[in-house]
Image (cartoon, helix red, strand yellow):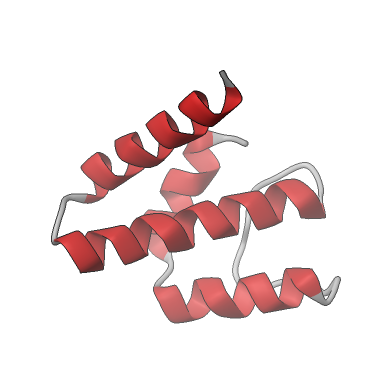
Amino acid sequence: MKIPAIKKLVETANLSELKTAEAALLEELTPAIEVGGEDEGEQLTHVLAAIYILEEVEAKQIDVKVALRDYIGRVRSSIT
């Protein structure tokens, strides 16, 4: 997981584009948008993270930076 790749997706893609990219990756196709990552698994991780963050921004009416920070905190706590 690369935070800059997630941040770029959040800043440049909308939910519809991200969900289309998710579907493409699940079908082992190349997404229409540029998704950073070394392999399809990492790209899918980035897309799913961006979807989660944008949905949080919409649902809670919070800033993207806050949603990104919350997401990273959730990931870190799940690892430890």
Q: Is 41 left or right of 69, judged from the image as shown?
A: right
Specify whether 68 is left or right of 57: right
- Quarter-of-image position of residue 35: bottom right
Residue located at (72% from left, 46% from top) = 42
Q: Quadrant of the C terminus?
A: top right
Rendered location of residue 67, percent (x, y)? 28, 46
Left/right of residue 14 with respect to residue 36 in the rendered view: left
State whether residue 2 is above or below residue 15: above
Instruction: Tell me where residue 11 appears, x and y as whole percent.
Output: 36, 56
**Is 70 in front, or is 11?**
70
In this orientation, does residue 4 appear?
yes
State the image coordinates of residue 60 (x, y, percent, origin top left): 17, 60
Name the residue nearer the viewer: 39 or 77: 77
Q: Residue furthest top?
A: 80
Quick check: can you spot residue 30? no
Q: Tell me which corner region of the image, top left, top right, bottom left or bottom right, holds residue 22.
A: bottom right
